[in-house]
Image (tube, rainbow, N blue to C red):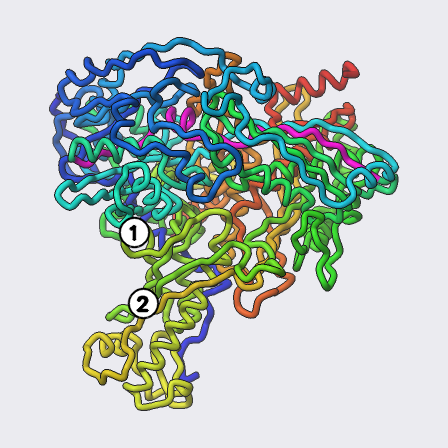
Amino acid sequence: MAGIAAERYTGASIKRSEDPRILTGAGRYVDDIKLPGMLHAAFVRSPLAHARVLSVDVSAARALPGVVAALTGAELEAMTVPGPDPLMALIGGAGPTPEFTLLATDKVRFMGDPVAIVIAESRYVAEDGCELVDAEYDDLPPVTNAAFALDPGSPPLFANLGDNIARPRSRSEFGDVSGTFADADSVVHFHIDVHRHQNVPMEGRGCVASYDASLGVMTVYAATQSVHVSRIAVATRLGIEHDKVRVLADDIGGSFGLKIGASREELAVAAASRLVGQPVKWVEDRSENLTASGQAREESFDVRAAVSNDGDLLGLDVKMVIDTGSYPGMGTMVPAIMEAMLPGPYKLAALGFESTAVITNKASYVAYRGPWASETFVRERVLDLIAKDLGLDPVEIRLRNVAPRTDPPALMITGRPLVGVTSKESLERVAQLVDFPAFRRRQAEARAQGRYLGIGVATFIEAAPGPRSPEGPSGPMGMEFMRLRLEENGIVALFTGQMPHGQSHQTTLAQIAADEFGVPFEQVRIVVGDTDVVPFGLTGGSRSATMTGGVALHGARQLKAKVLDFAAHLMEASAQDLLITDGNVWVRGDPASAIAVSEVARRAASGQFGADVDAKLEVEATFDGGEGGWSGGTHCAIVEVDVETGIVKVERYVAAEDCGALINPAVVEGQIRGGVAQGIGAVLLERSAYGEDGSFQSATFMDYLMPTACDVPRIEIEHLETVPLDADVNFRGVGEGGMIVAPPTVVNAIEDALSPFGVRIYEQHLPPARILELIAAADSGQ
Amino acid sequence: MVDITLRVNGATCTGSPEARKTLADFLRDDLNLTGTHVGCEHGVCGACTVIVDGRAVRSCLMLAVQAADSEVTTIEGLAPDGGLGTVQQAMWDSHSFQCGFCTPGFVMQAVAFLSDHPDAGEQQIREALSGNICRCTGYQSIIDGVLLAAERSRKR
């Protein structure tokens, strides 16, 4: 093609265009924003888990030089609009939604609940002011666990609910549950617990709110997964018309589900800015982040499994209780996702699923990378427990139960088609990569020397985006929007509602658009983070690979067609005969005809053409997910457990994953490894710990232990790209899988290591002290 | 307020921070060097690491007044010509980071460590960086970047 480059960016590990600024300190995170006249906020927080607020006296704080305002919950309430959790208001949580104030007024519901805000000339002085706020409380009995919350006699956190049930018990049955259990060779019964842990992005929550009274416009510089979701919250709770609220965001230091909209604190900061008429910044410190930003998991499962003597998992009957913490939101939605996903890739004949969501005096439940992940933990733990009873190998029991890939595809017992699922392939690939017989020999030799090695596998699927529903016209994840424009200088600009916070969208979306449009990678610009110019969108739920990758591809195709139509006028050629490659438009077969895309754009902007010519080189694209599809895979861990100290070392970790076509392999691998590291942390280190009085006990990094470079091994990744489903878009999401499947993988390996002691594991958090307890209990025959 | 003079990224700076102001806040607020990030303010996460008189230091645990008369290097000072230093370039080439918040601390820690241990191997590098927390990457890409930087430095 006459020297015009035709290499493809999509599928290559293109170096990230985000990195030059990030590596030089030139990234702009919310705490880097400095506006003229900007003040700083700090919050007074409850030292008690559950108490009536008797009084909050801010007068001494107000008198402190440098303090501009100090507001109680009641004062703030008078300036804002009451309502439920803004995210729940948007997407509709199940069950009763208690209305609550931005800052606590009548009572505090967890240790760290904000009761007053102090605005001052510096964060130092704002914190000095907080020290001077005198809040008096009358203790109430704390509701610190789900069992007490379920007790009708527990003191209700919300008077309007009358009890501590956020979502009442509900039960669904799929298939013939009673028949399946009656006919099974055996029914086994386990109780499985998942502990509370949390997102912990390295940048906490924060914002700068700036109200312009003369224009009546509120501008919020946010750290958020969606500027539009944040805008809805600010406009709704502050009573400002949506179009008068502008939310902006730049670089964001991680989130993992935490920063979906505007938090209570951020809304309070915005209200304070409106009151004082100056910009106000709040960036939470690490103690606030750990104590008050939100936490996840803490679910318990009462599991009955119907099993055949050959190792067929015929049915599951699960009773789940989820502890949603103090201000119910996301936690009320998770059980329904778990119910749908619990069968995984396996051919269960029946599923009974019962769930209850309760309210306790802990930080609120928030989304954390794969919020429904515990269904995979439960299922993959149960499979290993059954395999142990029957003397089956963990790969063997999974291969036996996994649904075969058929046409038409097998249906999950909960309804969705397992189209294109490659669980079987990933299990077989992991078995090849790891060489189980060789490991078993090494394991036996090590045991003879008093060393305890173990191997664990686990399999998952992730609806990223999920299969296209046979009945519905809309895709599996709704619509994704994008505006694309050829700028006057030839830059192809993509306006997306995605709000990247580590996912590398600036790189990956440019790869796709550059290929589809025909310009160099550097000639594509990704515009994010401004409600005035980007369409609605949200980064979360592993949706961006398919949904945004897809809309970028189709949008670039539409924009290209429009540009060619215009270029056809300029070049006096038929649009069908024109190509765009490497940033040039040319007539097929005549490379000498080439003119730069930037020249076409400049001519379009000049206005020098007839009224019959459409020179608006801009399109609004939508994408419904196409044929969709599943992500998934199998992970395998080899661990060594020191039975004297209880320390677990992950010696080797292998992942065989299928996320369809890879946009950027290095980015995909980074997502997988990061998720696995969080999963290893969840099992071996991390726990959001509460005392019996409801006091929070892991408010620093000395108490909430994060995995370090010495805790996370090299993670070997094998990509499977087995089944294309869509004519164009076969990229699938990979953001959550690592965190979903790593915990059962590691726990299965630990149980295998401890099998000489007869240890059986029914929980997820296994720090050294707990490992020693499990060994001691097994030794003593408990 | 205490008057101090120090050298930051090769330039002489003066300031009058409160005695209680951390070096991290002084760099960020008073000198507008916002590349130094504050991740925990209790010395565990390492995001705020800068180099003071040749040693990697947690700028959240050091007061600005303690840095008086010192030579401080921040992420902004590694490649004053607007390019990338050896460690930065190797980390770009290795896809080391995702959200970028921990990045300045890792880069400064790696620069300080490699200058003292140019022949370090993987395990040594892991231990040297184990005082810096990254929540996104699982560390492998960061370790690979430091190994690559070490290899390139040795070849020079």
Check if mark 1's residue and mark 2's residue have beta carbons within 8 Å. Answer: no
Depth order, front residue of A106/A318: A106
The kind of residue on which mark 2 rests is Arg
Residue ID at (82%, 33%):
A187
Depth order, front residue of A660/A547: A547
The kind of residue on which mark 1 rests is Asp
Residue ID at (70%, 50%):
A412
Whether residue A298 is visible here, answered yes or no, is yes
Report the span colored magenta: A278-307
Q: Is residue B84 left or right of residue A381?
A: left
The residue carrying pointer 2 sits among few (fewer than 14), some (14 to 19) or many (20 or more) residues within 10 Å by Cα, namely many
Q: CA distance from mark 1 to mark 2?
A: 16 Å
According to the picture, the residue beneath numbered tag 2 turns out to be: A485
According to the picture, the residue beneath numbered tag 1 turns out to be: A530
The chain to which mark 1 is attached is A
Q: Is residue A754 left or right of residue A181?
A: left
